[in-house]
């Protein structure tokens, strides 16, 4: 898993030579204080590195090139304490390939009413210095995040933190490998997509492997490794009687552990942090991986079932973005409905739901799968914890990718579901099932999603902006007539913006 604490965002104040050394020294000091305050904020998960005040085009360009090649820099935060003529920024910003935030703040939050003079005005002029910088961003059509507010406000820290988390997800995508074990489920449309377009636009690479490659790795797993892992299962989960030591189906649990160890080893050796499988191609595997996939997701791997590499990559991005936050995230599927009480969704999958979204101790169980013709798979069963969440889907429209986000409210089940042999969550989508499902379906949103209790729509919206990807939000403010128009306008906009 990526540790966000190892990553950095660079904080830079822009200025110019006209002010003289005394003012520039103050600008540098103030920038250092702001960088330190942001770095110390609990909302901000990476280091904030203060860079020297920029006063000319060449140093700005060098800074941007340095940011591009830095392995740990996830983005640049720029602030114009004084006036920095923005043509100086063109060469640098044209080269910058990392995400850009424009922090529009001021060092002093209060006007010093009784003492204000031209020296104060000379130093504290971000009100117009940042407008000059903003113009060049608009003129160059730069993708950027603008955050406005006092640098000590916790709400500003939260906004910066959400952007930084998105930038960490984007940083991870630059080198992400998604391993596909087998192809997509036959005849399914929405899980398909253009892998070359994904690599060009979303940066990650998607590579196919024969399931036999994993089977070979699984065969190398030793009994000692299996003993150790099954002992861990026995402790970490409420293991069903038949799967416990001496139980009649203990061998199935051992086989599940063998699959987990082999799959984990395979992913480590290929350097993939996301993967897919499909129940239609399990040659040589005894069971469809269940507990293995659930636990790999819990450790930060992205996963998509039935060959769904787009969702696998999205789950991985969400895992990185939410690192260190409570709440968890999982591959998910809108599975079945309760159409009473305004409508609720029962989300689940055949097996593969991540235990990070529950507060309860999962049970380890074994049941038939009723599909795929393999041995009964072991899986963890639990119910997702209650609270706000986001449910997001990434689809390929042929000429572009579209991210669809729905705010949902996870709720406890109205009644126990003792016969349901899979992990699940129950939620009401915002604003309600009728509007949310109409909007979702009209936008082409998939049945596969990533569900996150840790993130807000804002994180994913920032991520989409960094990728230049269309993003649609369905929440309490969604109104279907406006949503339908947004779809039409976006078709026209992206057709023009993406050109050929
Ligand atoms: Mn599915």
Image (tube, rainbow, N blue to C red):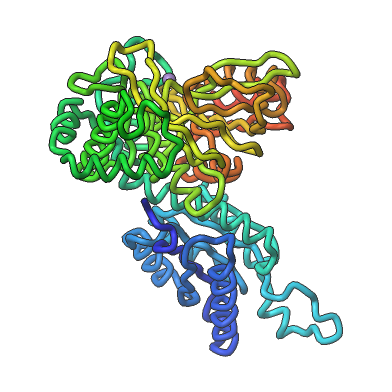
> In this image, 262 relative to 174: left or right?
left
Residue 457: quadrant of the picture: top right
Q: In the displayed structure, would residue 387 be above or below residue 142?
A: above
**Quadrant observed for ligand 1 in the rendered image:** top left
Q: In the displayed structure, would residue 339 be above or below residue 436?
A: above
- Residue at 42% x, 33% y is 239
Q: Position of residue 444 (x, y in %)?
A: 52, 19
Q: Position of residue 56 (x, y in %)?
A: 46, 73
Q: Is residue 418 visible?
A: yes
Q: Is residue 495 visible?
A: no
Residue sticking out furthest to the bottom = 22
Closer to the camera in the image, 139 or 212: 212
> In this image, 482 relative to 306: left or right?
right
Q: In the displayed structure, would residue 219 be above or below residue 156?
A: above
Closer to the camera in the image, 237 or 301: 237
- Residue at 22% x, 23% y is 285
């Amino acid at each position: 898993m990526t540790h966000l604490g190892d990553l950095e965002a660079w904080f830079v104040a822009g200025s110019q030579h006209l002010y003289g050394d005394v003012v520039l020294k103050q600008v540098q000091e103030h920038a250092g204080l702001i960088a330190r305050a942001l770095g110390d904020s609990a909302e901000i998960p990476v280091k904030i590195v203060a860079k020297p005040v920029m006063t000319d085009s060449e140093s700005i360009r060098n800074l941007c090139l340095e940011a591009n090649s830095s392995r740990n820099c996830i983005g640049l935060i720029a602030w114009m304490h004084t006036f920095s003529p923005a043509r100086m920024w063109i060469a640098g910003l044209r080269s910058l390939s990392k995400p850009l935030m424009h922090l529009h703040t001021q060092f002093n939050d209060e006007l010093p009413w009784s003492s204000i003079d031209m020296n104060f005005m000379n130093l504290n002029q971000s009100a117009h210095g940042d407008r000059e910088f903003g113009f060049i961003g608009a003129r160059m059509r730069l993708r950027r995040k603008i955050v406005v507010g006092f640098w000590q406000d916790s709400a500003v820290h939260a906004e910066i933190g959400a952007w930084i988390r998105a930038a960490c997800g984007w940083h991870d995508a630059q080198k992400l490998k998604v391993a596909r074990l087998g192809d997509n489920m036959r005849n399914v449309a929405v899980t398909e997509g253009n892998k070359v377009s994904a690599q060009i636009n979303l940066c990650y690479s998607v590579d196919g492997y024969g399931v036999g490659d994993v089977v070979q790795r699984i065969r190398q797993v030793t009994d000692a490794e299996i003993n150790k892992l099954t002992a861990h299962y026995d402790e970490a989960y409420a293991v069903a009687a038949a799967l416990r030591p001496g139980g009649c189906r203990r061998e199935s649990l051992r086989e599940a552990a063998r699959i987990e160890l082999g799959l984990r080893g395979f992913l480590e050796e290929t350097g993939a942090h996301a993967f897919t499988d499909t129940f239609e191609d399990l040659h040589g595997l005894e069971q469809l991986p269940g507990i293995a996939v659930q636990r790999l997701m819990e450790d930060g791997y992205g996963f998509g079932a039935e060959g769904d590499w787009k969702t696998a990559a999205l789950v991985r991005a969400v895992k990185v973005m939410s690192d260190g936050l409570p709440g968890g995230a999982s591959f998910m599927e809108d599975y079945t409905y309760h159409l009473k009480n305004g409508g609720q969704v029962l989300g689940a999958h055949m097996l593969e739901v991540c235990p990070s979204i529950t507060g309860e101790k999962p049970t380890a169980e074994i049941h038939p799968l009723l599909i795929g013709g393999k041995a009964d798979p072991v899986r963890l069963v639990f119910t997702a914890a209650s609270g706000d969440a986001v449910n997001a889907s990434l689809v390929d429209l042929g000429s572009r990718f579209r991210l669809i986000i729905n705010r949902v409210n996870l709720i406890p089940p109205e009644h126990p579901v003792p016969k349901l042999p899979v992990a699940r969550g129950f939620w009401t989508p915002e604003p309600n099932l009728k509007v949310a499902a109409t909007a979702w379906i009209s936008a082409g949103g998939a049945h596969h999603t990533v569900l996150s209790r840790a993130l807000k729509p804002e994180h994913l919206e920032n991520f989409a902006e960094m990728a230049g990807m269309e993003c649609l939000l369905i929440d309490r403010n969604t109104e279907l007539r406006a949503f339908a128009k947004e779809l039409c306008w976006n078709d026209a906009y992206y057709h023009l913006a993406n050109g050929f």
